[in-house]
Image (cartoon, helix red, strand yellow):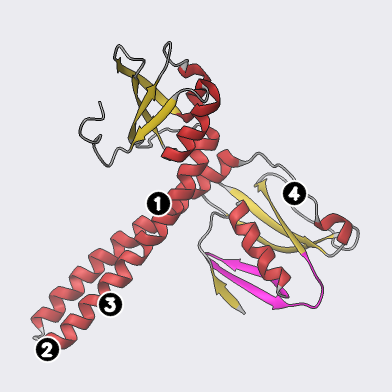
Amino acid sequence: MWRYQMAVKGSEQELRWLNQQAQRGQLLRRIRGNWYQFQKTATRYQVFSEYVSGNVATEIDDQHTPFKLLARLQLTKPAVQVIYTGTAQTELQGARVDRQDAPLQLKIALAQRGHLLNVMNIRLVVGLILAVIVISLNVSDNVASWGMLAWLLFTFYPAWQASRLHKQANALRVITQQYDDAWRPTMHVFLKNMSTELDTEKVAGLGAWVYVGQDHHGMYWYDLKTLASAAEIKQSLQPIVGDSVSVSIVSWLGLAPIGFV
């Protein structure tokens, strides 16, 4: 049985989904792009994945290890293999390993996102060429309308998939603090009842801070270029500034309410 799933290869999200399938008796067998092949099994398996560089031997002896080789996937950007294994031993199924491979996951997510955007562009150009041909053939308006709708759905579906990967890539950027070539929206952070300026070094992991100004009543205003959400910013700031300080965040999508400052 084949199933379609869009996920960063080797990520925790993908692994969680694969283990959900394994709990239903569907064990991973093969991967082709975003298509996953499963086989039925009556044995309960726990699935694991890991990245292996191309110059490392990846032969796994199923006869002498508790782990069964399920599938392997060769990636080109970056050039690594993703090895998927599974074990039926209950004492190993609860094991959790912090692989600290977020930087590699980020590279894979960006490569997958770029591929989907390229697919969208190709479909857009091909669709325009077909549209010109259809118009020249004087096809009925009803057929042309349905054809246009199908073309739009077919073209922008990869863009929707790319947007999902974009969110995962943003989360990985926050974890890795790698913002190269990334556009970060500016969040406006207001701190009320502050006795002194914010020590931005303590929250540098959120993004790039810029001091904007202050008033005579303990209100400080900062602009923060970040990929973190307003809730994440407030959650990180509150323990540092204390409960007596009011933290207000205005999204980059809107202006401050009238009379706020």
- The residue that label 3 is drawn on is 150
* Disc on the earlier residue, 3 or 4: 4
Q: Is residue 241 above or below residue 248?
A: above
Q: Amino acid at mark 3?
A: Ala
Q: Amino acid at mark 1?
A: Gly
Q: CA distance from mark 2 to mark 3?
A: 16 Å
Which of these two is toward me, 5 or 136? 5
User: Can residue 115 be seen from the camera position used here?
Assistant: no
Q: Position of residue 94 (x, y in %)?
A: 80, 54
SS of the residue under disc 3: helix
Q: Amino acid at mark 4?
A: Ala
Marking on residue 114: 1
- The residue that label 4 is drawn on is 57
Marking on residue 140: 2
Identity of the residue drawn at 85% across and 62% down: 62
Q: CA distance from mark 3 to mark 4?
A: 46 Å
- Magenta: main secondary structure equals strand
Q: CA distance from mark 4 to mark 1?
A: 29 Å
Identity of the residue drawn at 36% across and 66% down: 157
Q: Is residue 40 magenta?
A: yes
- Judge depth for marks 4 and 1 and give the one in front: 1
| Labels 1 & 2 near each other (Cβ < 8 A) | no
Q: Position of residue 76 (x, y in %)?
A: 53, 51
SS of the residue under disc 1: helix
Q: Would residue 258 appear left or right of 53 to someone viewing this image?
A: left
Q: CA distance from mark 1 to mark 2?
A: 37 Å
Query: Which segment did they paint magenta?
Result: 25-45
Q: CA distance from mark 2 to mark 4?
A: 60 Å
